[in-house]
Amino acid sequence: MAPLATPPGVESICRNVLVRTLRMRRGENLLVESWTHMLPWANAFVLEARRLGIRTTLLYEEEATYWRAVEECKPKELGQFPEPELGALSKADGYVFLWGPEDRPRLRALPKEKFDALVGYNSKWYQAAEKAGIRGCRIELGQATDPAARFYGVNAAVWQQNLLDAMEVDVRSIARDAARLAARLRKGKTLHVSHANGTNVQLRLAGRKPVVDSGIVTPEDVRAGNNMTTVPAGAVYVAPDEKFIEGNARANRPSYPTKGMLGGGEWSFSENRLASFHYESGEDRFTAAYEAAPAHKDRIGFVSIGLNPKLHLAPGIEDFERGTVLLGIGSNGAFGGKNRIPFQSWLVLAGAHVDVDGTPIVADGEIL
């Protein structure tokens, strides 16, 4: 695949990310990290940052060399956290990550031992970024590559254009909606999700603070350790009471976990646990992961509501489509819950109706 060309208006996109998402100021230090297929975008970010008086450093990973190293070197040597990068993080104020490698399905298909070794530095990276108080973002366009599109069975050009459209949405409007929904979810006691397709699920809220991915990294986010956002944004997540759920849920959007697309999912809950499931496509993949998971894999884990009005096809951030409800089981520690098992799965429902304590907050996919 050729590098992803920058579109007309890329300057305004980069400026919005730097100014509105990361709140970068003149004289601050920015790290831009890129792979080969996203280098034109990396250069656009570097140029726009320098126009704004932001001191910028580019970190670059060449795709072909990376894969040669994966084949020829010991994985544990590739998964080390370089000291110079650690030093750069400690001095940076902002960070832009342009996703890579381009062939992420190839990365995910590696034997587990090798994959774990390659990405073993991730926790150290996030710890260093949090300690430094970095305001960072991941540019989702870097995931919309030809290999990934073939893997998920979607059109790469349509996927890329949808992400570009969504990147132009004013993140300030998303943040306002997110704050309103988060307040309702924080204070509410019960949550009801329904749809004309037969979905009817009752949950209990637990007074937990929702996690917001609005596309703006605020000082509060940095203090809370939520210093990385996604571009395009956004969604509001909450971990409900893991010990209560009843009803049935039926997806009308695919889910895109790392092992492959899941379509037409249906879940039935009984005695506060997932009692049965069915998928029109990918059921074998879900079954294999579910059966291998430890206890509490069948507990409700998290719920999210999407906020971006331009997203309609976005594997990896399918929950960001405006008014879309995501129901997840399994691990929810990242959202303030108690379940930290190494398993998650989710259903995606567009056009849903959501009530908190009997009052609608989403009606037919519209945020109220």
Image (cartoon, rainbow, N blue to C red):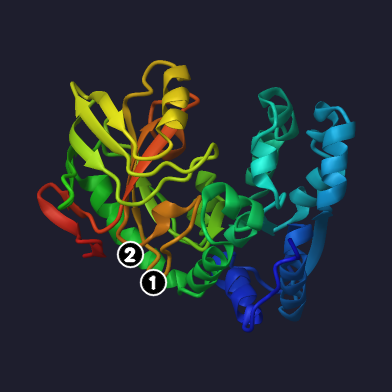
Measured in 3D between alpha carbons, the distance from the residue under mark 2 to the one under mark 1, in whole angstroms, is: 6 Å
Q: Which residue shows up at 72% across the image and 77% down it? A: 48
Q: Position of residue 68 (x, y in %)?
A: 87, 41
Q: Position of residue 340 (x, y in %)?
A: 46, 25
Residue flagged by tag 1: what amino acid is it?
Answer: Ser
Secondary structure of the residue carrying tag 2 is: helix
**The image quarter in which residue 202 lies:** top left
Q: Which residue shows up at 55% across the image and 66% down it? A: 21
Quadrant where the C terminus is found in the figure: bottom left
Q: Residue 177 carries which label?
A: 2
Q: Position of residue 330 (x, y in %)?
A: 39, 29
Residue flagged by tag 2: what amino acid is it?
Answer: Asp
**Badge 2, how many Cα within 10 Å: few under 14, some, many 20+?**
some
Find disc 1 in the rendering and name its residue.
173
Q: Where is residue 315 in the image (x, y as percent from the top left)?
A: 50, 52
Quadrant where the N terminus is found in the figure: bottom right
Between residue 103 and residue 59, name the one nearer to us.
Answer: 103
Residue 12 visible (yes or no): yes
Secondary structure of the residue carrying tag 1 is: helix
Q: Which residue shows up at 22% across the image and 55% down it? A: 352
